[in-house]
Structure formats: C-alpha cells, structure tokens
Amino acid sequence: MADPLDQRTRFSRWLVRLAHPLVSPALALVTAFAVGAVTMLLSGDNPLTAYWGLLQGAFGGLDALSRTLRTATPYILTGLSVAFAFKAGLFNIGASGQFLMGTAASVAVGVLVKGVPAFIHLPLALLAGFAGGALWGAIPGVLKVWRGAHEVITTIMLNYIASLFTSWLVYAGGTQGQQPGPLSDPAAAAQGISQTGTILPTAKLPELLPDVLTRVHWGLVIALVAVPVIWWILKRSTFGFEVRTVGENMSAARYAGMRVNWTIVLSMAIAGGLAGLAGTVECLGLHGRFAPEFTGSAGFEGITVALLGRTEPVGVLLSAVFMGGLYGGAAKMQFESGVRSEIIQVVQALVLVMVAAPELVRVVYRMRARRSEEDTAESKLATGWGG
Amino acid sequence: MAPVETTARRASAGVLRRRWITAGLTLLLLAIVILVDRTSLGDGPLGILFGIGVLRFTLRAAVPLIFGALSGILCERSGIINIGIEGMMLAGAFGAFAVKSHTGQLPLPLSLALSTLSACAMGSAMGYLHALLSIRFRMNQIISGTAIIVLATGLSTYLFDPDWLSRGKFSDIAIPVLARIPVIGEVLFTNGLLTYLALAMAIALHFLLFRSRWGLRTRAIGEHPRAADTMGVNVNRWRYINTTIGGAVAALGGAFLVLEAVGQFKESMTAGRGFISLAAMIFGNWSPLGALGASTLFGYTQALQNQLLLSGITRVPRFFISMLPYVTTIVVLASVVGRTRAPAAEGEVYETE
C-alpha cells in the first residue's frame, strides 16, 4: 500500500531533518551580514563592494583559498577547545592564554632541543605544545572544583598572565640592565627585537601541497584529524559520556557516582591542550618562531567558532572555515573597497549574537519554536557563579 | 522559633565583629600612612608601600573598578549576570572620546558634561541590549555578555579614527576645609569629579539597595522572582531598568579612563578592568560598600605595580610585576569560597505563569 504522497512527505521530512541543523545558523549569518551592511551604510561605507571584496579575498582563487585554510587551521582547534569545555558545562574564555602557553612550550622544544631526528623532534614539540596548553587550562579547572572560583574570571586573568609571561620569555632585555628572557634570540636581542630564534628544521611542520596551496602546512591535517578524535571522545567513549553528563546535570552525574571534579579538571585540560595545539601548529608550520605579536586572538575567535558550530565537532570545522574566510578575506576587502577591516569584528559579534540567540532569529523570521530547538548547547552552560 | 533567632543573632554578631575588624585595620593603616608621610620612614621601601603617591594612584585605579562593580551589583542583584561590563566600559570610553574630540570648540565643562552623557548613553544602549538578549530572547546571559564585549570591541575599533584629538580633562577639585586634613585630605578630597561620583555612588547605592523600596524590589527579583511577582512586582521590567542603568554606570568607568585619567582613547583600553570589577563584586559579596573596599584593594595592587616599576627598587622583571593585579584577582577569588553568596535566581529566565 505504498502511497506516493506518503513517500514524498517522508522524503521531504528526511530532507528537512538533514537540512534542519543548518537552517538556523544560515539565517543567523544572513541576518548578521545584513546588520553589518547597515552599520557600514551608516558610517558611509559601501557594503556591496566590501562584501564582494571579502568574498574574493576568502574564496576567489587558490591564493585566497590558501589564506582561508591557513587562517582556519588554528580556529578549528580553538573552536574544538571551547566546544569541548562547553560540553562539560564550562565556558573557556581562556583559549588565547592556553594558545600562548602551548606555543611557548612547543617553540622552546623546537629551538632548544638539538641533534634529534625529525620523527622524534616534531612529535616532541607537538606534545609539548599540547601539554603547555593543557597545564594552563587545568589551572582554572582545579580552581573551580577546589575553590569554587568561576572559570570565566580565572581564565581571563590567566590570559593576561600568559601574555605577560610569554612576553618575558622572549624579551630582548632593556637598556637599564634588564636581563633578556630565557628564550630570547641573542642576535635579534642585539637589535632590540624580542623574539625567539628560528625553530630547527627537524621540528618544522612541512607544507602540505607547496605547488598548489601557498604556505598551507600539515597543521591543517592535524586539525582535521582532531575533529573526528574529539567527536569520538565525546560521543563514543565512557569519558565523553561523563563529560556530557556533568555538563547537563552535575548533581545527576554525582549521584551516578561519576568523578565530577576529575571530569571538570580533565575537560579543561583537554580544552587547554587543543588551544595549545592551535598555537603550536601556527608557530611550527607558519611563523617558524615566536614573538609577542602572536597574541593568540584565535583563542577568542574560538568562542564564535564553537557557538556557530553548535558545539559539535563537525559544525566547528565548518564554522572555522567560514571564520577563516572572514578574517582571511578581510585584508583583500580593505584593499579593494577601502572599508576598514575592523568591520569584520563587528560582523563577528553580530554572528555571535544571532547564533547564540535562536529565539532572536525565530522572531525575525517569524518561525515557530521547535521542541528540539529548546535544547540548544548553550542552555546547558552554567547560569550562575557556582561555588 | 528558637534556632532561627539564634542564627539571626549569631549573624549580626558576626557582622558586628567584621565591622570592628574593618575599622581597626583602617585606623592602623591610617597611622602607618601618616607615619610614613611625616617621618623619615617614608624614604625607603615603606614609602613605596604606603606613601601618598601610591594611595592617590590606588584611588585612581580603583574608580573604574568601583563603577564596574556597582554596575555588576545593579544587574546581578536583580538576577541578570553581567559578564559584559568590560564591553560596556569600553563602549563608554569610546562614546566619551567621540563626543569629547568633536566638541573641542565648546567650553571645557560643557564638552566634558556632554562627553559623560554620551558615555552613559552608549553604556545604557549596551545594557539594554544585554537585557533584551537575556530576557526577551532568552540567550544564555554569560554568552550574551561575551557578545556585548566582542560587539563593543569591534564597533569601537571600526569607528575609531586615530586623527581625533581630545584636549582637556576633569581636573582635581579640592574640597574646602576637608582637603586640608593631612593625608586623608590629599588622597580623598583632592580629586576629579568622576572620582567623587564613584565614591558617592557606592555609598548611595548601598543605602538604596538595603533601605529603599527599589532596593527591596531589586533584591526580591534577584532572590525569588516568583514571590516578588506574586507581590505585584513586575520582575522583567525591573530587570530591564536595572540592567540598562547598570550599563550606564559601567560606562562611567570608561568615561573616567578617557576624561579624567588618560585623556585619550586607545583600542581595548579597558584591559580587563571589567573582569577585575566582577571579581571585586564577588569579593564584596554583592554589596556596594563591600565592592568599594574590594575595588580599593585591587586598585592598590595596580598602584603598587606602578610604583614598583617606577622606583626600580626590585630586579624582578617588569613582566612579573605587571602580573600583580591579575594574580591577586585569582587569589582573592579562590579565597572567598563559601563566604560569599550570589543572588539565588541569577542567570535564570523568568516567565510569568
């Protein structure tokens, strides 16, 4: 009794289900760009030439595509970092500090460890980067479970501390007899430049396809591998189950006999490690050294990436490429249209607002609320100061 | 009945004891400061720790934190978490600077007044947006606050024009008679207008919060909105009002930076002050006078950092000295566990049944 009508509804229902998770973020993006255009109009810029320049700069040709992928690489990892913490009900605004500490650790290994073959040196540097970020990320976790200090404030403070600490590491020294930092490169320091020496070739991440894509390095592959790994940990492993339970209902997790404190600390450590890895691949693959100008802003971008990707690993990947295009194309946009590239930050804030308030998008487009949409990732996030 | 009574009495005894300790410590500090200022004790490291210079700087550093913490209290006592203070402060700083640099031809007091108003307008817009997102659109308040920060950073960087110039600041006004009190007069009663405003606002808000009808309503909707609603208080309306005012108050902190302290606007010039004031709010147990004290403590760490760097007395690299305010914030936050209590209904959307 196969009713063709029934068949069709089933098919369209399937189509709707497949497309559904994309509808809300897509509408959010459209709205954000529209409001961004209004902002540009109000300050006397032409949004059309700006967005056209942005699109060209992001995806127009292999050069633009390389730039987008290059920019997206750390975003994937910091986005995963923020998303992972989210799953445990934690808000990690500290990814930029973890990014910096990871970078410093990996560059230290890359510069100071000498005379080892690449197949030891490179993994060692990557591991150091992950560990540096993980340790820095574990601190707010420990402070939260042990002293009840809210991670939002502690991670922000640790960002500033990490920034000062890494600046000291590479400090060139001062005229009034201030000592140079332990990682500062003597040759550069003599000219008053604060930076490390070059990372040894054995610790460098090679370029992926040097003939096709410019300066896109193996860090992209590492980030792409991290996506299914994090997905597996969250969805298939026992630990991931504990993470999600703690994030959704801490007292239930405690009642079920889960080690809640341990889960929180470990989640923050993994989040920190991912952010540290982001800085690591950035330095080992792209810059080849560390200087204080590498501010770890990808850490803050990770928040938008994670929310836009609905805190799901695959979503993070997609939104990281989108954000990579946004920031990668910004310079071209400024060059083509004369619109200051800072407008991108405004668009990003609007994206964040639209994405994190599904209710807002629903009101704008007069959509009816769905039962399943009530359960957005962010609703699981802590709503108080805890402790 | 009996246990309740004992608890209440014990609590009030605790409050009393705490007040005595605070008063005692203040007197002790005052004695040290006067000794340092008037005798040769002040020539050495004690001068750095307790000299007039460090105390004056403490107050200057504390003012934005006081405004920030008061903003936090206004919002959170009514049940709205405000992570976005940093953004509201930055918006205020930008608003103040934008108007200041375009009203240079006006008399200075008028230009300053307009700039302060503009800061408040920008801040209340941000506050209103935060309220709108968290109440009307039921966004998670922590994320909404973060969005406010990203938005304020982005907008102020995009709209900022490095060619804008601002001339003239709020100058110090010595309050007659009081300013002549040794030490205290110099530190407390020779300041700019916004500094006085911060101190007065902390005291006034404390009184209003715990003694007025508005204060009772605010505390009620932050603790038990359902009960307040039953008593006829319009929960969400007051949350809108408080958060919008809170935005304006945070913006005053930004206005202080531009109009009284620095005189110019710099991108991201708030440098984490919004978050430190959140810690001050928590440390001060969501009470305005407590926040005043906590802000002063955090201001002191910044002043000390500044003095240590200027005096060159220590060989410790300046990077580590600059960490002082941030490390103190973490240590303080980690040490108050269990001793403070946030408003009970914080962060929850309230819907009438």
Image: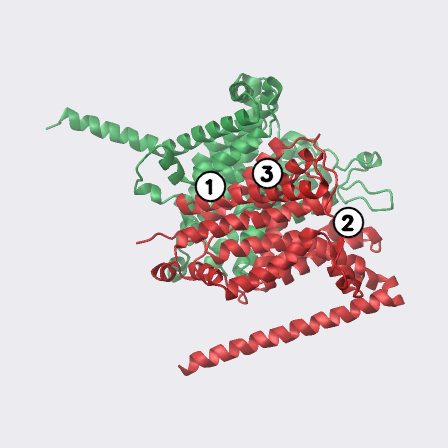
Chain colours: A green, B red
- Is residue B120 placed above or below A144 in the rendered structure? above
Q: Residue at 67%, 42% (x, y): give it.
A: B110
Spatial CA span between label 2 and label 3: 27 Å
Q: Tell which subunit mark 1 falls on.
A: A
Circle 2 sits on which residue? B318
Dot 2, how many residues are within 10 Å of its Cα: few (below 14), some (14-19), or many (20+)? some
Badge 3 amino acid: Thr
Question: In the image as oriented, which residue stretches furthest toward the bottom?
Answer: B2
Classify mark 1: helix, strand or loop. Answer: helix
Work out whether disc 2 and disc 3 sit on a shared chain: yes
Residue type for callout 2:
Arg
Work out whether residue B256 or residue A275 is closer to the camera in this orientation and state it. Answer: B256
Percent x, y for residue B335? 60, 64
**Subunit of mark 2?**
B
Residue closest to the far right: B40
Is residue A308 or residue A140 the one in the foreground? A308
Q: How many marks?
A: 3
Give the CA distance from mark 1 to mark 2: 39 Å
**Image point (55%, 67%), residue name:** B339
Question: Decide: marks 1, 2 in contact (CB < 8 A)?
Answer: no
- Among the 4 quarters of the image, the one containing residue B28: bottom right
Q: Determine which residue is flagged by label 1.
A: A230
Kindly state the secondary structure of the residue where label 3 is placed: helix
